[in-house]
């Protein structure tokens, strides 16, 4: 099955700096790559996603890049703010048609943004 | 409020017991997914249901079972509980396939403590 590796496990940056989280996946058939943010005491929340026919996607301060050849994808957060502090999860899956799909998650990155 | 409702929020029970976790998906979502989150294992996929039928199985123990009812709510049954079953259990739902929105919506989870 799909194996998703995520690095680093913890990341500390100063407010205003950029943060980068990297993931690799094993199944070349995977075609959907979302990123989730989990705040303390809450469920994960989708923040951005990318499909395999796209190399990069940006939404304000957040961007995701995908390298299908190398089977890795990354989350970039620019101009970080204290409220960006949370655990971030990457995931990968193969779209399974109308019935949906099962996401395979990385183990998470705990991001701390210090003022 | 994400629209996915999980009950109860907290559950404390003894080893050997059986518990049932409940999930109501977001209105219109046909797929329900169950995940287990523990500190060292991240988010582990357990099982997926689509419109009442089991569609995918992950690392779900034989002591665990699930079902999705005609009204689309789902229940996860955990039996012969062990200390190692203590974790956060999340339910997520997703929109029907064929749309551009592939993202999961997670509930806020049920924290299970086995003593």
Image: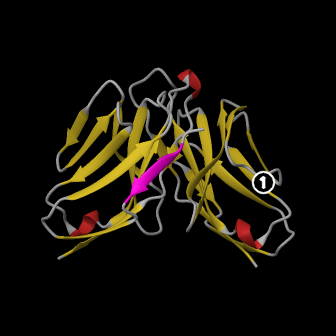
Judging from the image, what secondary structure is the residue with disc 1 in?
Answer: strand
Counting from the top left corner in percent of width and height, residue B62 is at 82, 50
Q: Mark 1 lies on which chain?
A: B
Residue at (57% x, 43% y) in the render: B25
Residue A11 seen by the camera: yes
Label 1 crowd bin: few (<14), some (14–19), many (20+), radius 10 Å: some
- The scheme the figure's colours follow is secondary structure
Q: Which of A85 and B40 is in front in this view?
A: B40
- As for residue B79 lying within the magenta part, the answer is no
On screen, residue A63 versus residue B63, left or right, reads left
The image position of residue A68, as x and y in percent, is 35, 31
> Left or right: where does residue B77 sit relative to residue A15?
right
Q: Quadrant of residue B111?
A: bottom right
Q: Residue at x 55, y 39 (%)?
A: A2
Residue at 33%, 42% in the rendered image? A73
Q: In this view, does A88 lie to the left or right of B56?
A: left
Q: Write down the region rendered in magenta.
A: A3-7
């Amino acid at each position: 099955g799909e194996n998703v590796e995520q690095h680093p496990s913890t990341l500390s940056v100063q407010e205003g700096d950029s943060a980068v989280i990297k993931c690799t996946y094993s199944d070349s058939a995977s075609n959907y790559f979302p990123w989730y943010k989990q705040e303390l005491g809450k469920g994960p929340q989708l923040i951005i996603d990318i499909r395999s026919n796209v190399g990069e996607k940006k939404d304000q301060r957040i961007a995701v890049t995908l390298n299908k050849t190398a089977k890795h994808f990354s989350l970039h957060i620019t101009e970080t703010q204290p409220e960006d502090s949370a655990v971030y999860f990457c995931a990968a899956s193969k779209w399974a048609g109308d019935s949906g799909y099962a996401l395979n998650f990385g183990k998470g990155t705990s991001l701390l943004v210090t003022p | 409020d994400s629209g996915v409702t999980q009950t109860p929020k907290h559950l404390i029970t003894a080893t050997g017991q059986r518990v049932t976790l409940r999930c109501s998906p977001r209105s219109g979502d046909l797929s329900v997914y169950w995940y287990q989150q523990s500190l060292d294992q991240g988010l582990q996929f357990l099982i997926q249901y689509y419109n009442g039928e089991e569609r995918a199985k992950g690392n779900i123990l034989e002591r665990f079972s699930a079902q999705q009812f005609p009204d689309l709510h789902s229940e996860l049954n955990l039996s012969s509980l062990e200390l190692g079953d203590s974790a956060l259990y999340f339910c997520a739902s997703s929109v029907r396939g064929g749309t551009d929105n592939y993202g999961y919506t997670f509930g806020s989870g049920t924290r299970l403590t086995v003593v």
